[in-house]
Amino acid sequence: MHHFNYRNGQLFAEDAAVVAIAEAVGTPVYIYSAATLTRHYQVFARAVGAPKHRVFYAMKANSNQAVLGTLARLGAGADTVSEGEIRRALAAGIPADRIVFSGVGKSAEELAFAVDTGIYQVNIETESELDLLSAIAHARGKRQSAVIRVNPDVGAGGHAKITTGSSANKFGVSFDEASRIYARAANMPGVKMLGLATHIGSLIMDLGDLEAAFIRMRDLTLRLRGEGLTVERLDLGGGLGIPYEIPETFEHGPDLIEAYAAMIERTLGSLDVEHGFEPGRLIAGNAGILVTKVLQVNPRAHTTFLIVDAAMNDLIRPAMYEAYHEIWSVRQATASAPRKTYDVAGPVCESGDTFATARPLPETHIGDLLAFMTAGAYGATMSSTYNTRLLVPEVLVNGAEFAIVRPRTTFNDLIGLDRVPRWLR
Ligand SMILES: *Cc1c(COP(=O)(O)O)cnc(C)c1O
């Protein structure tokens, strides 16, 4: 369930009118709902058995500190993929002992920072990374808790660019090598080898793919234990999908979460291990929208273009993954209002800067506000300043109240980052 609904003909985020936020902050603007973040986290955490099992929110989905702070207060940990994300999680009040460090290419500096910070777990992706981590921690007189990310050779997810669990992908050690590497790791001075991790992709709606991966994790756990090795943690990754094509009455599917939790219990329940979870999109996706203003209406022979003030640099999912986002008018159209078919595009000089093609919408005019729904995950965090466009501001709504949680950058901020070399001065 999310908290973006029409009231009196206007789109509201919780109890705040979207039009009022757009007037106060300008467009484009990302708007997040604290109640939605809270609900998604709580439904998920309860279903998977937190706090006995652990939820590490995958913060690359949305790493605004206000979002992290909201989740931190509910007990969430963070799944991080860079030193910057570890620092951001700490700054938002997530303690080190609730931080996991994943990622396929961690530098020596990043691993040293993680060890010095005393984070909960490093998810090791390659044998060379294992050697590096052990050496770094040992040199500091420490043993870093770690698990090994295994690639179960089960590809899954909504798009080739977000599949990570097939042997053709760069992620994790191969299944065949896992036992040998695990046994080596168990005897290394700088690591405390506690278990296994996996993460097979994103936008997964078919639990069968996850189950196949988890069965392989169970078999590997039993094999390692048979060799006398300790396996007490299984990090099951994230990747659970959310529907992007949502009717206006959409209820966020607790059903899928319940079925996921039941599948895990059935598959892994007998192992007596601590489960870790790394949901990202599931928590943040439906908790955010991107509000944009129509700049131009351009009728052409085959379609009418709506040129809006948001662009691919603000929300790259349609350009990068052919992703679909529902588009709602901020002012609700009456049932009898004429509908037309539009192509919705941004102002960036690339044909890929298109949000939707042949999309039926209520008749739309210059100056109207539109909302890209389900933009809370992989929206602002993937934004850039391409075309020297300012980073979009982010707003968090809490009931009737709202706060700007990232202001729009200024042109001075942006242009001032460049330095002119001596010979051009
Ligand atoms: C991206 C990522 C996640 C989160 O994926 P979602 O699809 O957003 O749930 C979790 N774990 C790892 C290792 C990731 O890379």
Image (cartoon, rainbow, N blue to C red):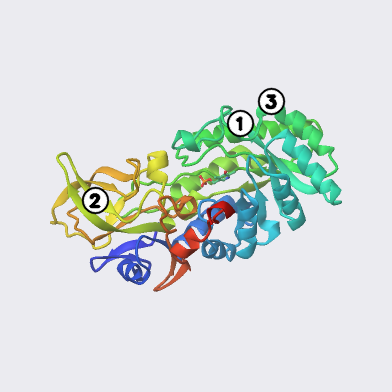
What amino acid is labelled 3 in the image?
Answer: Asp
Up the image or down, 280 lies above or below 30; here it is above
Q: Are marks 3 and 1 in contact (CB under 8 Å)?
A: no
Q: Which residue is mark 3?
A: 176
* Residue neighbourhood size for the residue with mark 1, other residues' Cα within 10 Å, grouped as few (<14), some (14–19), many (≥20): many
Q: Which mark is residue 102?
A: none
Q: CA distance from mark 1 to mark 2?
A: 44 Å
**Hey, what amino acid is under mark 2?**
Leu
Residue 271 is situated, as x and y percent measured from the top left of the image, at: 69, 40
Helix, strand, or loop for circle 2?
A: strand
The local secondary structure at tag 1 comes to loop
Residue neighbourhood size for the residue with mark 2, other residues' Cα within 10 Å, grouped as few (<14), some (14–19), many (≥20): many
At label 3, counting other C-alpha atoms closer than 10 Å, the crowd grade (few under 14, some 14-19, many 20 or more) is: few
Label 2 sits on residue: 306
Q: Position of residue 295 (x, y in %)?
A: 25, 57
Q: Nearer the viewer, mark 2 or mark 3?
A: 2
